[in-house]
Image (spheres, helix red, strand yellow):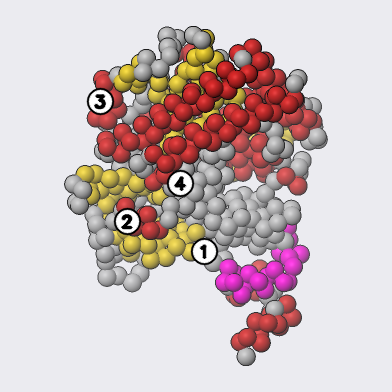
Amino acid sequence: MDMVTMNIIDSAMVAICREMGVNVQKTAYSTIFSEAEDFTCALASPEGQMIAVAEFCPAQIGGVPLLVSSMVQEITDINPGDVIVHNDPYRGGLHTPEHTMFKPIFVADELMGFAVSIGHFVEVGGMVPGGFPGEATEIFHEGLRVPPVKLIKRGKDVPEVWKLLLANVRTPRGNYGDLRALISAVDMGEKRLVELIEKYGKDVFRQTVSDLMDYSESRMRAEIANFPDGRYTFEDCLEDDGIEAKEYWIRVAVNVQGDEVVIDYTGSSPQAKGPINATLGVAWSASYNAMLHLTDQTIPKNSGCFRPIRVISPAGTIMNVNYPGSEVGGNTETHPLIVACIFGAMSECAPHRVMASEGTTHGCFVFGGHDEENDEPFGAFDFTYVGYGGRQFADGNDATDSINGNCANTPTEVFETRYPWIVEEYALRQDSGGAGEHRGGFSISKTMLCTGDVMISQMTNKHIRTSWGLKDGKHSVPGATLYQAKGANDWQTIKEAFGKVSSSKYSNVPIHPGERISVKAPGGGGFGSPAKRDHAAIVEDVLEGYISREKAAEDYGFEESWIAKYAPGEVAAAE
C-alpha cells in the first residue's frame, strides 16, 4: 500500500463528505437539518461499498452500505446527471422518515462511484404530523414508502415523481426545500470527487480505495483480536410498543472468535404490533455503531472495517421486522438499546471500553398544526437529550443526544420563533443520573407553554424502566412526559390525561393555548460503587445543584460538614 497517497485520498474524501453536510445544513428548510444536523453524507463505490463518510449521524453511517447496495441491485440503468431517491425500510432503509439521495459519479464515461446524502424528514405523510405515530400498527400508517426511483434523469427533474412525493405530505414547501438540500449535497460530492479522481487518475484512485478498505479491515481485525475469545450475552427491553402494555426483549450474544465477531440476536421477542421494530438495516447499523465505539476511533470509516463484523438477526422479531410491520421507532428507540446491550455484553470482556446504559432514547416529541401568519401547515421534531452512562475513568456526559444520533440542540430562540411554544424551562434534570464511583450523566427537562392549536405525538422509552449501571453502579431516574391543563396546578401523564396505553408512545393528542407539556428525559446509569466516589466530586455536584442534598445523602452518605472540608470558599462566601 502507498500509505501516503492512501491517507491523502482518505482525508480528501472525508473532507468532501463534511462539505456536503455543511451544504445540507446551510440550505435546508427544516430545523432538524439546519439546527439538529440529523443527516449524513458519504461516498460509495460503484458496487455499493461505502468508501468514506463524515461524522454526522452514527445510525446512518452504519446504514449506508445496505442502502447503496440495495439501490444498485434495483437501478441498473444509471446515467450521468441522475439522482435517485429511496426511503423504503424493507429495501435496506432505516425507517420511513429517512430519505437517501444517490448521484452517480462518472469520469470519462466510466462510473466511479456514488455521492450519498441521507437525512431525516420531519414530515412524511402518514397518520400524524411529524413522522412518529406512536400507535402505528403497519407501515402504511407511517408515511409514504419510496423504493429506489429516479427523481432527476440526466440532469432534468422528473415532474411526475416530484408531484407524487409532495402530494403525500402536509408540508410540501418544506419538504421541497429539504429534498433540494440533499440534492445539492450530492451535486457537490460529485463535483469534488471528480476533481480528486482527475488529479490522481482513475487507476490510482481505484487501487487506493481498495487498499483503504483492506487497511480498515486489518485494523478492525487487530482491534477485535485484542478482545478475549468467548460468548458474551446481555438483554434489555423496551417497556411497551404503544399498542400493548408489555415488554419486548432484545437478547444479544457477542461471539468473539479470533479477529472476527458474530453478533447474534436469536431469542429476541417476536415483532411487536406497534412501531418499535428494527429493520435489518437498523440491526446492522446498531451492531456496527457499537463496535466502532469499542474500537480505535482513528480507523477509517468505510465498508472495510465492517467486514469482520457479522450479524444474525432473525426475521419476524423486533430485530428484523417482516412486512408490513410498523418500524419508525426502531431507529430511534431500539437502535440505542441494541448498542447498550452490546456494551453490557462486552462489560466483562472490555470494561475499559464501555459505559453503563445511557438514556437510550431521543425523546422524539413531534407536533404539527397550521401557521396562521403564513397560512400554511407546519410540522416539527424536537429532541430531548439524555444522560450518558458512567465509565471506568469518568462520569457520563450530560444532556447529550442518544448514541446513534449525535444531533445538536435546537436553540430556544429558533424553536420559539418557528413554532407556537414558549419554553418556560430548559435545564439539566436534577438527580437524573445514576449514582456511582463515576456517576451517570444528567438529562434534560423541558417545559413548554402552548400558544396555538397543535397535535402532538411521541416516540420515546424508559418512562417505566431505568438506565442500568455497571460494576455496582446505580440505575438512573426514568423519563416522563407530563401534561398540565390550562389554569390547573397538577400535572398528569399522557396516559392519565388522555387515556393512552402508553405515556411514552402515543399519537395525535390535541394541545391548545394555555396548556403545558413537560418532557423529561432519562439519565445515565452509574459505573462503580457509589461508596468509592470522591467526596470532593460529590460536594461539587451538590453545590452546582446537579444532585439534591437529600439524594446525595441517600446515595453517597453526604454530610454538610463535607462542604467546609472540600469547598471552604463556599462557606466563607455564605458567611
Q: Is 149 placed above or below 354 here?
A: above
Distance Cα–Cα, label 3 vs label 2: 30 Å
User: Would residue 531 be counted in the magenta stretch?
Assistant: yes
Question: Which callout, 3 or 2, points at the residue further toward the start of the chain?
Answer: 3
Q: Which residues are magenta?
A: 528-547
Question: Which callout, 2 or 4, points at the residue further toward the start of the chain?
Answer: 4
- How crowded is the residue under tag 2: few (<14 C-alpha within 10 Å), some, or many (20+)? few
Q: At 49% from the left edge and 36% from the top edge, which residue is drawn?
A: 21
Distance Cα–Cα, label 4 vs label 1: 21 Å
Q: At 45% from the left edge and 21% from the top edge, which residue is drawn?
A: 103
Q: Secondary structure at mark 3?
A: helix
Front position in the image: 16 or 230? 16
Front position in the image: 199 or 550? 199
Res 101 → quadrant: top left
What amino acid is found at the position of numbered circle 2 in the picture?
Answer: Thr
Q: At 75% from the left edge and 46% from the top edge, which residue is drawn?
A: 351
Q: In the rendered image, which quarter contains the N terminus?
A: top right
Q: Give left or right: position of 335 versus 122.
A: right
The image's mark for residue 429 is 1
- How crowded is the residue under tag 3: few (<14 C-alpha within 10 Å), some, or many (20+)? few
Q: Position of residue 87 (x, y in %)?
A: 41, 27
Q: Give left or right: position of 412 versus 397.
A: left
The image's mark for residue 417 is 2
Res 212 → quadrant: top right
Distance Cα–Cα, label 2 vs label 1: 25 Å
Q: Which residue is mark 4?
A: 36
Front position in the image: 114 or 276? 114
What amino acid is found at the position of numbered circle 1 in the picture?
Answer: Arg
